[in-house]
Amino acid sequence: MSKLKNIVIVNDFDYIQGGASKVAINTANLLCDKFNVYFFSGATSEEIFLDDKVNLITTNQCESLKNKNKIAGFFNGLYNIKARKKLAQLLMHLNRDETVVHIHGWTKVLSSSVFDVCWKMGFNTVLTMHDYFTACPNGGYYNYQKNEICKLCPLSFKCIICNCDSRNYFFKVYRILRQFLQNKIVKLTKRLDNVISISKFSEDILKDTLNDSTTVYRVYNPIDFDKNRKIADYTKNKYFLYVGRVSKEKGVDIFCKAVSDAKVKGIVVGNGDEYEVLKSKYTNVEFVGWKNSKEVKEYMKKAKALIVPSRWYEGAPLTPLEAMQYGIPCISSECNATIEYIENGKNGLIFHDVNELKEILLNFAKYNLKFSPASLISKFSEEKYISNVIRVYEKVLCKEGVNR
């Protein structure tokens, strides 16, 4: 058996652009003391996020849909030939029996061409399913026009004619074409040998869309625990808190309405498309904009509870865990993976709609919620995460029947 020596992390961005990018970068940084780590990205930044020991290779492109050359952006989004060629150049110099390619994000810059080249060159490849792009054209099982979860079968006739894109139907057609190439030409779901799911919640949604021969490993994303944390007495705190992107699918308007109707104090930390609209409509809610990680933690420590009002199938939000490490309870909608962290009525609360959330806020003082931060650390620490990831790599490297 050959020993694992090289790990190639593949992600659209080599800077923090959402949760997937953060996990991809952390994975590279946590592994670089033990292995030869290469980080292959599509878009790059002057700001350095990767350890000096990580080898960075980038196509130095922008997001396909933000390309000033609309034609080039269109075709790159469907199948990025430059990404394919550059990744092939990297892999040519690596022993495939000593190497694992770990893909995190590919839909915004790199395209499914990165899978295609890995498989054609016979490299062991793992995908972390941070979203639902292996199945759903818009990656979220969400109808942005109706502002609700989509129950249609992906790529069915009803799916194809449905205008669910956040922009317009032209972009939906583009996503359909991309999915067609991904499924019919690259044959992504048919050839995926190894995937990592980040929660039971998202795994249950995606498992029927995968090949029967696909091996699914459950590895929870890590959070950066505050080593100097102190458990706060949330009962003495004064406000309810929302942290994250201010967008429709995140349900920030649900938070604002419930807080307003219950006449309690609410603070929104974050920015996004709905920021100005909601700030103007809900003048009693305090909108503080984007804050860095240290500032966010200070808001958490002083909150009565963190509220996660998502309307869509969030696969594994980490913000609730970051709040719970300080003893701050979490109140979550029932349609996202936060419910995996919550024992309803014990260490948090789950609500069905805005009226139920309002009642919870009005009666919050009666709940006697308890926490065990130690159990979170054992399950979601960086040490636990990297140990599990290495175990997956070793199993994949030993696995027979790799696409070669």
Image (spheres, rainbow, N blue to C red):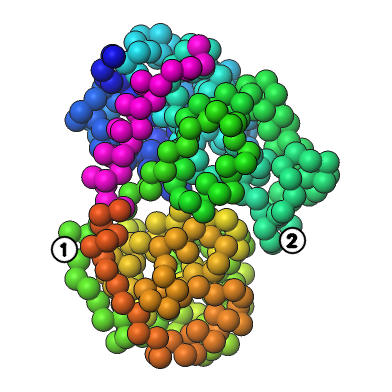
Label 2 crowd bin: few (<14), some (14–19), many (20+), radius 10 Å: few
Magenta stretch in the rendered image? 380-404
Please, what is the three-letter code of the amino acid marked with disc 2?
A: Lys
User: Residue 227 at x, y = what percent?
Assistant: 17, 59
Name the residue tied to disc 2.
146
Please, what is the three-letter code of the amino acid marked with disc 1?
A: Asn
Name the residue tied to disc 1.
228
Q: Is residue 60 visible?
A: no
Q: Main secondary structure of the magenta part?
A: helix
User: Residue 86 at x, y = what percent?
Assistant: 47, 16
Label 1 crowd bin: few (<14), some (14–19), many (20+), radius 10 Å: few
User: Residue 101 at x, y = what percent?
Assistant: 41, 24
Q: Is residue 27 above or below residue 168?
A: above
- State left or right for residue 343 relative to residue 236: right
- State left or right for residue 332 relative to residue 174: left
SS type, badge 1: loop
Q: Is residue 233 above or below residue 50?
A: below
Question: What's the mark number on residue 197?
Answer: none
Q: Quadrant of residue 343?
A: bottom left
- State left or right for residue 94 relative to residue 361: left
Q: Is residue 351 magenta?
A: no
Q: Is residue 399 magenta?
A: yes
Q: Quadrant of residue 340?
A: bottom left
Q: Is residue 229 above or below residue 49?
A: below
* Residue at (25, 77) in percent of width and height: 232
Q: In 3D space, how far apart are the residues under numbered discs 1 and 2 (Cα atoms)?
A: 44 Å
* Residue at (48, 32) in percent of width and height: 215
Q: Is residue 380 above or below residue 366?
A: above
Q: Quadrant of the image for the N terminus?
A: top left
Q: Is residue 199 visible?
A: yes
Count numbered badges in the picture. Answer: 2
Nearer the observer, 309 or 151: 151
